[in-house]
Image: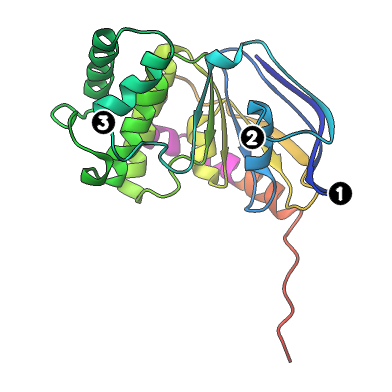
Amino acid sequence: MLRVRGVTIGYGSEPVVDGIDLDVLAGQFVTLLGPSGSGKSSLLRAITGLTPLMRGNIARDVPANDVGFLFQDDALLPWRTASQNVALGLVIRGASRADAREQARRWLLAMGLSGLEDRYPRQLSGGQRKRVALAQVFALKPKLLLMDEPFASLDAIVRTRITADLITWVEREQLTVLLVTHDIEEAITLSDAVYVLSQGPRGRIISRRDVTIERPRHVIASRQHARFGALVQQLWNDLDSTPAPRAEVPQ
């Protein structure tokens, strides 16, 4: 579904990531795990075509219309209701307004937002806004979903609940997903494979770990799985193998 070969991305002459190779197979959930400043988001934007490459090649087996993108911040228009925000992309794609409204209603219901269709983003909690954003993306039926730390701003309880729902939706829709995160437990809970990116600048892939926890997945059960703790330790060791430079204490 997605192949990245020898990709180097930079701003000016300084590479942010250097020589990146990774593969995402159809129906696979892959995570790119790395510390802040390692270039994870830059690589994701390059895959969408928003950031140019210095070197290398990115090949997708799906057209741009079949790629969904979930951002760190909610990409909701504040002057549109939840229903109108979800319906907008469908209308742009050519759906009638009536059909777009009905599909928006169904997705908001699936996201647990029944009764909130006519609320504006300012009238919703952070978790509710994130569910609207998910409905907005899922309504377009993407074949490849790219996610840029979408749940980083949520509290632990809301994040766990949305993660559980995301697993259900991704498995039901048989989506192919590439997630970037700095959260080791999130990476293991969601993924079939985890690529570890070293500390930047010149971030590079330093390991790939397969997650052999069976599907369908459940958030709490996955974290209690016999292999979970060992994977946490392996990924932490991988990240710790290229520690960030330590700042000197002023004298």
The local crowd at label 3, few if under 14, some if 14 to 19, many if 20 or more residues have their Cα within 10 Å, is: many
Give 136 or 216, whichever is nearer the viewer. 136
Query: Earlier along the polypeptide chain: callout 1 or callout 2?
Result: 1
* C-alpha distance separating marks 1 and 2: 18 Å
Task: Establish if 80 lies above or below 238.
Answer: above
Q: Where residue 54 appears, x then y in whole percent?
A: 84, 36
Query: Earlier along the polypeptide chain: callout 3 or callout 2?
Result: 2
Query: Earlier along the polypeptide chain: callout 3 or callout 1?
Result: 1
Name the image colouring.
Answer: rainbow
Q: Circle 1 is placed at which residue position?
A: 13
Q: Where residue 171 appears, x then y in whole percent?
A: 43, 17
Disc 2, SS: helix
Q: Circle 2 is placed at which residue position?
A: 45
Residue 26 on the magenta segment: no
Disc sitting over residue 66 in the figure: none
Residue type for callout 3: Ala
Residue 222 on the magenta segment: yes
Q: Quadrant of residue 104?
A: top left
Stretch of the chain drawn in magenta:
218-232
Residue type for callout 1: Ser
Residue 226 visible in the current orientation: no
Task: Establish if 154 lies above or below 98.
Answer: below
Q: Name the quarter where the C terminus is drawn.
A: bottom right
Disc 3, SS: helix
The local crowd at label 1, few if under 14, some if 14 to 19, many if 20 or more residues have their Cα within 10 Å, is: few
Q: Circle 3 is placed at which residue position?
A: 82
What residue is drawn where x is 30% and y is 42%? Answer: 127
